[in-house]
């Protein structure tokens, strides 16, 4: 075996689940994907720093990404079809801790029926220009995203994950 090929293979970047070319091809159908996502809760797996997380999209295409910690803490990123515009942090209970505006382009997402692509300087540094989450499941969602709704959904999600044997 060629030792150069062997060494090169050790440093080969793994192929992302969705390539930039595939993202470009799907761009013409973004409105179709937005309509598909309306009134849904998406259970998303990865990127690794979030593990399993939930992306809720209401009838007005408001988005809320809810990331829970096993300790009961929660982070809720709210925004629209293009990405996050704000983040709220909750302590166990849930008890509201803090909120912060997120500027345009800081945390963007593109929702497809099989993947969610995340991009922006708000995310950890990586050699890849984007992170990908796999849509593991989707469920109907008929709520309206608001701060009051966040306080209700966090305990519900914690309980849901307990009953579904979540592995972090």
Image (cartoon, helix red, strand yellow):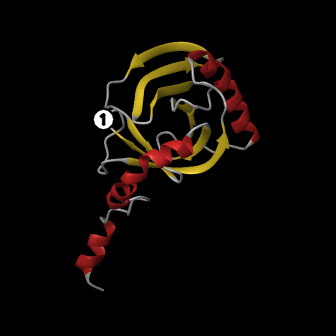
Q: Which residue is mark 1?
A: 121
- For label 1, the crowd category at 10 Å Cα-Cα, with few meaning under 14, some 14 to 19 and many 20 or more, is few
For label 1, the SS is loop
Residue 143 as seen in the image, left or right of residue 100: right
Tell me residue 146's x, y (percent). Answer: 57, 19
Q: Residue at x 64, y 25 (%)?
A: 154
Tell me residue 167's x, y (percent). Answer: 64, 45
> Residue 80 occupies which quadrant of the picture?
top left
Residue 64 as seen in the image, left or right of residue 84: right
> Residue 166 occupies which quadrant of the picture?
top right
Quadrant that contains the N terminus: bottom left
Tell me residue 45's x, y (percent). Answer: 55, 47
In-front residue for pair 104/93: 104
Q: Relative to 1, does residue 20 appear above or below in the rendering?
A: above
Q: Residue at x 57, y 38 (%)?
A: 38
Quadrant that contains the C terminus: top right
Residue reaching furthest to the left: 4
Residue 92 in sight here: no
Q: Residue at x 30, y 48 (%)?
A: 129
């Amino acid at each position: 075996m060629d030792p150069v090929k062997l060494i090169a293979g050790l440093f080969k970047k793994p192929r992302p689940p969705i390539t930039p070319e595939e993202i470009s091809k799907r761009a013409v159908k973004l409105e179709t994907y937005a309509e598909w996502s309306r009134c849904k809760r998406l259970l998303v797996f990865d990127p690794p720093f979030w593990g399993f997380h939930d992306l809720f999209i209401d009838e007005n295409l408001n988005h809320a990404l809810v990331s829970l910690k096993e300790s009961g803490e929660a982070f809720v990123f709210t925004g629209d079809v293009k990405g996050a515009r704000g983040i709220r942090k909750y302590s166990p209970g849930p008890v509201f801790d803090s909120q912060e505006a997120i500027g345009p382009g800081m945390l963007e997402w593109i929702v497809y029926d099989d993947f969610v692509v995340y991009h922006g300087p708000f995310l950890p540094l990586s050699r890849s220009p984007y992170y990908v989450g796999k849509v593991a499941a989707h469920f109907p969602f008929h709520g309206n995203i608001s701060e009051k709704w966040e306080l209700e959904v966090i305990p519900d999600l914690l309980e849901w994950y307990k009953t579904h044997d979540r592995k972090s």
